Image (cartoon, helix red, strand yellow):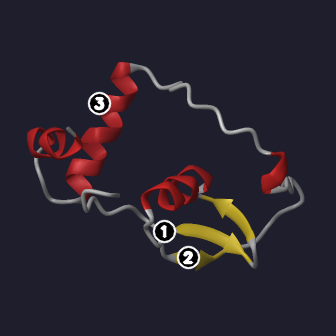
Amino acid sequence: MRVGIKFTGIKVDGDLIIDGHHRFLASILAGFDLEKFPSYKTSVTNFIKWEDVEFVYEDWDTMAKIEYLNRIDAENNGITLEELTVLLK
């Protein structure tokens, strides 16, 4: 986000994030405002207060998954994977 890569917005029901928790946190860290789309909670929606969330700095994704996600980000932004890699350095 800091280097200008575009990400899709998050889905919300009022103040409750339905989809996009990771993007929301990344947007706060990057100082980037994400678009919000209306959505609805369901009977299986869990409500957790942000004060109760523990921020973990460990990366859980494998190198293969990171490359896969980077390819998607490059495609969604109309650039090559190589161009994205340069931006991320």
Horizontally, residue 57 falls left or right of residue 66, namely: right
Q: Secondary structure at mark 1?
A: loop
Identify the residue position indicated by label 2 in the image: 36
Sequence-wise first label, 2 or 1: 1
The three-letter code of the residue at mark 3 reads: Glu
- Give the numbered dot on residue 67: 3
Residues at discs 3 and 1 in contact (Cβ within 8 Å): no
Q: Please give the name of the residue rendered at 48% of the width and 76% of the height, measured from the top-left corner.
A: 35
Left or right placement of residue 4 versus residue 58 in this view: left
Residue corresponding to mark 1: 9
Say which amino acid is labelled 2.
Lys
Q: What is the spatial separation of the Cα atoms under label 3 and label 1, in whole angstroms? A: 21 Å
Q: Is residue 63 left or right of residue 60?
A: left
Residue 84 lies in quadrant: top left
Of the residues under marks 2 and 3, which one precedes in the sequence? 2
Q: Which mark is residue 41?
A: none
Residue drawn at the location 57% of the way across and 54% of the way down:
25
Q: Give percent across and percent down for residue 85.
A: 17, 38
Which residue is drawn at the image coordinates 15% and 59% (left, top)?
A: 78
Residue contact at pointers 2 and 1, CB within 8 angstroms:
yes
* Residue 48 in picture, x, y percent from top left: 85, 53
